[in-house]
Amino acid sequence: MERLEKLSENYKWIERIASRTNIELLKTKDMLEEVHDRFFQSYDLSNTKFNVLVILYKGCTEEMYMSKIGERMLLSNANITGLIDRLEEQSLVKRVRSKEDRRKIVIKITEKGINSVEKVMEDYIKWSKKLMEVLTVEENNQLIKLLKTLQQGIIEIEKDNVLKIIEER
């Protein structure tokens, strides 16, 4: 019985550390989202709008349909339509008819959109560097490694959970 109590005490310590780690990660995620939101708002953008612009910027030589953008961003057609509407209002993108199939609408980044991506990206790199300067290069590399390990662990646990749910049905 005494061994069981000692074992239980060990698990309580582990549980406290695991809970504390989760809480700190969630707080950090919230803080990062908040500062990212403020950064992009200073350019009259959101993180999501900027991601659409980057997709169009990188793929500006190919025809890009709303459905393709939605797939890349894991967003529904309704959400993509609203995003494109707002970007078009800002003159950052435009809708044009496809040359191959006139029934289809292609989304193109405008010159203003290209300039915006380049400016924001340049500033984002400087801003990110400043944000992460609180850690040394070694600490940054260690953090990346730890986060990747945690991400892989989450993927594995979720696979197991999904399999258990399927098996229980």
Image: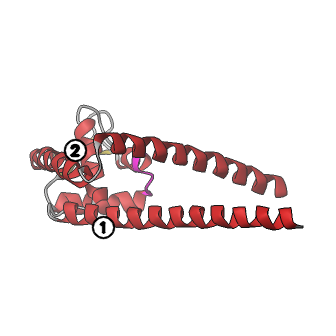
Residue ID for mark 2: 108
| Residue 115, numbered circle | none
The magenta stretch spans which residues? 72-76
Q: Nearer the viewer, residue 6 or 127?
A: 6
Q: Is residue 70 left or right of residue 45?
A: right
Residue sitting at the far front: 2
Secondary structure, magenta segment, majority class: loop
Q: Is residue 146 left or right of residue 153?
A: left
Label 1 crowd bin: few (<14), some (14–19), many (20+), radius 10 Å: few
Count the numbered circles shown.
2
**Looking at the figure, which quarter contains the C terminus?**
bottom right
Q: Is residue 51 left or right of residue 44?
A: right
**Type of amino acid at the residue the image marks with label 1:** Glu
Q: Is residue 75 found inside the magenta-colored segment of the image?
A: yes
Q: Is residue 169 visible?
A: no
Residue ID for mark 1: 34
**Quarter holding residue 114:** top left
SS at mark 1 in the image: helix
**Looking at the figure, which quarter contains the N terminus?**
bottom right
